[in-house]
Image (cartoon, rainbow, N blue to C red):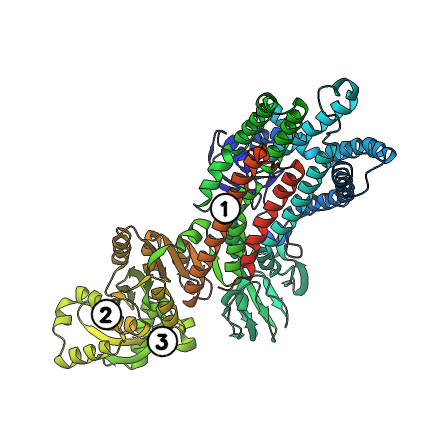
Amino acid sequence: MKNTYAIVGMHCASCANIIERKLKKVPGVENIEASYGTETAQITSEGVSLESLNKVISPLGYTLKQEQKDEQENSSEGGVSENSEKNAELALLRNHVTISIPIVVLSVIIMAWEIFGNKYGYIPAMNEITKEFFHHLLPILATYMLFVIGKPFLKGFFRFLRHGQANMDTLIGMGTLVAFLYSFGVSAFEEILEPYIDTEIMYYDVAIVVIGFITLGKFLEARAKEKTSDALKALISLQAKTAIVKRDGTEVEIPLQEVKKGDFIIVKPGARIPVDGQVIEGQSYIDESMVTGEPMPVTKNIDDHVTGGTINQDGVLVIQAQGVGKDSLLAHIIDLVKSAQSSRAPIQKLADSVSAIFVPIVLVIAIGALLFWIFIGSQYMPLAQAIALAVSSFVGVLVIACPCALGLATPTAIIVGVGKGASNAILIKNAEALEKLSKIRHIVFDKTGTITEGRPKIIELINKTSLPNEAVIELAARLEKSSEHPLAHAITNALGDKKNSLEPAENFKMHKGKGVEGVVKNEKYYAGSDQFISEITPKSWEERSVQDKKVFEEHLKKGLTPIILATQEKVLAYFFIGDKIREGAKEAIAYLEKNGITTHMATGDHEESAKRVSQEVGISAYHARLLPEGKQDLVKKLKDSRALVAVAGDGVNDAPAIAAADVGIAMATGTDVAIETADITLLHGDITKVEQAIHLSKKTLSTIKQNLFWAFAFNVIGIPVAAGVLVPFGITLSPVFAGAAMAFSSVLVVSNSLRLKFAKI
């Protein structure tokens, strides 16, 4: 069983690694993925309670909380229940920043005055009275900053001493505490220590400025991270808060979570439709742009389906609730986006591996730098200078080496990328698919409903019986009514409103990629491709007249698709179906080919029809008369070349190929099976969204690489400099600048990810 939990107390990528490492050892936990970017954990377990999980990690400062399943119950102006805690944390950080910034500014002024006045004489020197005043003020300010503002860092340090688990708070807590205790010791024993060390050098200002900068950085990072989930909040805000239902003959407005399946809901003009349902009274135009992306409103009549979150424009509708709460399409989309934003891309494995060992390595480097400058440095410089440099290097390494930027590099880009896709009607199921999509070299398209609109109609009917054409269509429609194939809809739709009252055939059976069979008035009928009918009634098929064969071939050359109605004894009728090429299909295929992606079309249709469509849209290769297994085999064959393969389709017969592909793409206008199997769903079946999805994938991956580069480069350069490798060249890095650089590196990474929100795809 897989559950998603919100994590309270998470401050860095190392926190995620600690949580994963600890919970993986809990009996019954099969898999866990903790994300610092979303502050959530996805845990797959059997028989493991939330209490038992928290028992393991609570001593380390972390708490898991069950995420609410019903978004409607907890939505409030686009937020969910966890937002209240995040808002409280943000408010606390804001207060700390408001208090600490004036103290930091004062400390920096004092620091600058001493350096540029007393040391170098660039400005008037500080007089003794002022100097003595600040000498006593700074310890007081540092005490407040460390033990009040910096309390979370100290807790992290003491947890490390108690449990041996180190994270960002450990590094900051240890560094600032050492700086404070060293300075306090010098202040308390100034006369005793004066012969041995330079008692003028103290680090109260370092403790103040480092904690101040890091608190400011955490506040800016939290605010920026909040913006990464704007797309999800926008989706949640589409949910109605209340619904007007008929109860005991009267209209009652109730909270949305109290609506039950089967309730009759009244939707007035201008109101948002609260749940998925079926129209039972009224007629209106519905703005479905939320789902379809199409700006033009759609007419809805009795028996039509409506989707929760869409807007009723003019008439009054009465709908019967069908998809309520988590069963609605909008709730499904929200869950899909949340799950994808919490998922982990393969490229993140490198960052995770480094983060897991990063903090222990930094501790070793910091202690090594401390010991080196005390014992080795003192051989080449005065002891007082060596000790001051040792303390400065120790604190600087601990402060600058926070792995936050590394931990945020991938998840923040994924969150924004997935949200960007959702706002453009591209639903991405997981981060792995988003990454793989940027690297595909082959893409296989289904024809009907993907390359074509999937709204085919009967172009010509050749009736070989004595029955009227309408009776033959009705007979075929009874067979096809239970089928989900777009070509079946062409026959049932030919009956107009009569299709709703039509009784389906009995003993219905579908032969995937071939046709259907069923019993009508105690006689078995078959409808499907010529290949299927030739297997059912081989003798009758072979003995067709020359004229019939000629007409059949002529229609195929026109690109029409045949559906043949037959019994086991004879052919009854030929339905020749035509379908329009989707708007933008040609341009989308041209874009893919131009970018080095080989396009294929796989269809169960005839050679001539497949050839005509592929030539019209510019597809490189077409594969006709393929059953579902054949499409799947084609995908496996393409994958044998070690190239990544994507499949785009919309039907039940596409599901095996979609499942076999590296990236499965489903048209939301297609069947549930295809959508559930796919990694990416295009909400209104627009083939041009494939181009946008690939473009988004490449931009997201590029952003991740940029983030990782800067995060790695920052630490690779910063840690050695802080440790003092450039001291022989007269270059040192003050812990003050190390703290500022560390704080803003995380903000830089998050800000870079946020650029994706404004990227054109």
Local secondary structure at mark 2: loop
Give residue 293's position: percent from left, percent from top.
51, 68
* 676 vs 101, nearest the viewer: 101
- The mark closer to the camera, 1 or 2, is 1
* 180 vs 651, nearest the viewer: 180
Q: Which mark is residue 226?
A: none
Residue type, numbered disc 3: Lys
Give residue 222's position: percent from left, percent from top.
64, 47
Q: Which residue is mark 1?
A: 708
Q: Give the farthest residue toward the front.
A: 121
Residue at image x 82%, y 42%?
Answer: 124
Q: Which mark is residue 580?
A: 3
Q: Give the farthest residue toward the top.
A: 192
Residue type, numbered disc 1: Leu
* 446 vs 259, nearest the viewer: 446
Q: Which residue is mark 2?
A: 606
Local secondary structure at mark 3: loop
Q: Earlier in the sequence, mark 3 or mark 1?
A: 3
Residue 1, visible in the rendered structure: no
